Image: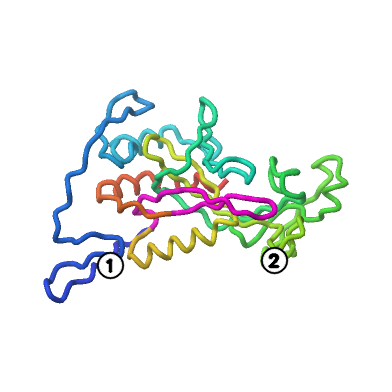
């Protein structure tokens, strides 16, 4: 649960609250925000949304409607990070098919703990199905970790899973990568439930292990600016990393603070969606 932000520092000369790292001069009146109209895709009604605003945070009935629908994690759209072979665009799964965008402004409704997933195959050979071993908390995993047994098994029923402390597992060690690289065979990941500006329902973004360091650094920058990830608009983009194989790293950038009304509505949505990134 978020706690109230600490009181801002005070300018010793003027007695006014000092601007934060990302803030503007608090003595300067804020310009009026341009307004636009967006159509709620579920009710087909027009809502007045500030430019740069979010449809779901302008809809007084959004939290109630989402709670009534009770979406399971599998019901939510996935915001996919492309492989190194594709173009530099996020892939959004919709009812009409796949959509592509090079950057996306989002607000965070939920952040999962660091999870782990182990596939007993080389990259691209068998990661389309569920992992052979996984951990929802990054501490204790359950599954099969015998690579030879998995390779020779004719059916999933032939494999017997067991628990394993992740810290002691050979596949959580650096250098265990089945490709022969320096990385871990058991990959870390974080799932985020995020809202884009035009959708009533959120999407699930899985942050791959190669992007976790940058994600943590971004949160530290926010902390330095006395801000929380759940109280700002974040811009997502992609950077291609030349390696073997090539891959894309997710980049994070601060856009603006959420207003007080936006934060109140987001808090209500977060309660409804608190388990949406767990499965």
Towards the viewer: 225 or 77: 225
On-image quarter of the N terminus: bottom left
Asked which secondary structure carries label 1, the reply is: loop
Q: Find residue 14 and report its horizontal and vertical position in percent.
A: 11, 71
Q: Residue furthest front?
A: 242
Q: Is residue 108 left or right of residue 277?
A: left
Mark 1: few, some, or many residues within 10 Å (few <14, many ≥20)?
A: few
User: Which of the marked residues, 1 or 2, is nearer the chain's N terminus?
Assistant: 1
Q: Which mark is residue 6?
A: 1
Foreground label between 1 and 2: 2
Circles 1 and 2: CB distance less than 8 Å? no
Coloring basis for residues: rainbow
Q: Residue furthest bottom?
A: 12
Q: Main secondary structure of the magenta part?
A: strand
Q: Residue at x 27, y 39 (%)?
A: 51
Mark 2: few, some, or many residues within 10 Å (few <14, many ≥20)?
A: few
Q: Which residues are magenta?
A: 229-252
Q: Is residue 264 above or below residue 6?
A: above
User: Magenta stretch containing residue 236, yes or no?
Assistant: yes
On-image quarter of the C terminus: top right
Q: Find residue 266 and report its horizontal and vertical position in percent.
A: 34, 46
Q: Residue at x 37, y 33 (%)?
A: 65
**Can you identify the residue that label 2 sits on?**
174
Quarter of the figure with residue 196: top left
Q: Which mark is residue 251?
A: none
User: Magenta stretch containing residue 178, yes or no?
Assistant: no
Counting the numbered discs, the total is 2
Q: Is residue 115 above or below residue 265?
A: below
Q: Residue at x 53, y 33 (%)?
A: 93
């Amino acid at each position: 649960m978020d706690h109230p932000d600490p009181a801002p520092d005070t300018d010793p000369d003027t007695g006014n609250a000092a601007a934060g790292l990302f803030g503007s001069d608090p003595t300067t009146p804020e310009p009026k925000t341009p307004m636009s109209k967006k159509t709620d895709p579920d009710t087909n009604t027009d809502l007045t949304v500030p430019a740069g605003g979010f449809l779901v945070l302008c809809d007084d009935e959004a939290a109630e409607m989402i709670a009534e629908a009770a979406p399971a994690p599998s019901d939510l759209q996935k915001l996919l990070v492309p492989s190194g072979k594709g173009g530099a665009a996020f892939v959004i799964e919709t009812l009409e098919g796949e959509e592509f965008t090079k950057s996306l402004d989002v607000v965070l409704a939920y952040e999962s703990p660091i999870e782990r997933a182990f596939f007993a195959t080389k990259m691209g050979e068998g990661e389309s199905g569920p992992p052979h071993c996984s951990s929802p908390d990054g501490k204790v995993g359950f599954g099969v970790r015998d690579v030879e047994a998995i390779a020779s098994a004719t059916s999933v029923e032939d494999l017997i899973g067991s628990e394993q402390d992740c810290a002691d597992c050979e596949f959580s060690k650096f250098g265990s990568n089945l490709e022969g690289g320096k990385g871990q065979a058991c990959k870390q990941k974080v799932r985020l439930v995020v809202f884009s500006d035009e959708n009533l329902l959120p999407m699930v973004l899985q942050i791959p292990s190669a992007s976790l360091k940058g994600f943590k650094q971004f949160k530290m920058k926010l902390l330095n600016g006395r801000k929380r990830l759940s109280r700002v608009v974040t811009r997502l983009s992609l950077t291609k990393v030349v390696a073997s194989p090539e891959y894309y790293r997710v980049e994070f950038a601060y856009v603006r603070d959420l207003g007080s009304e936006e934060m109140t509505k987001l808090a209500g949505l977060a309660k409804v969606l608190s388990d949406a990134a767990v499965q």
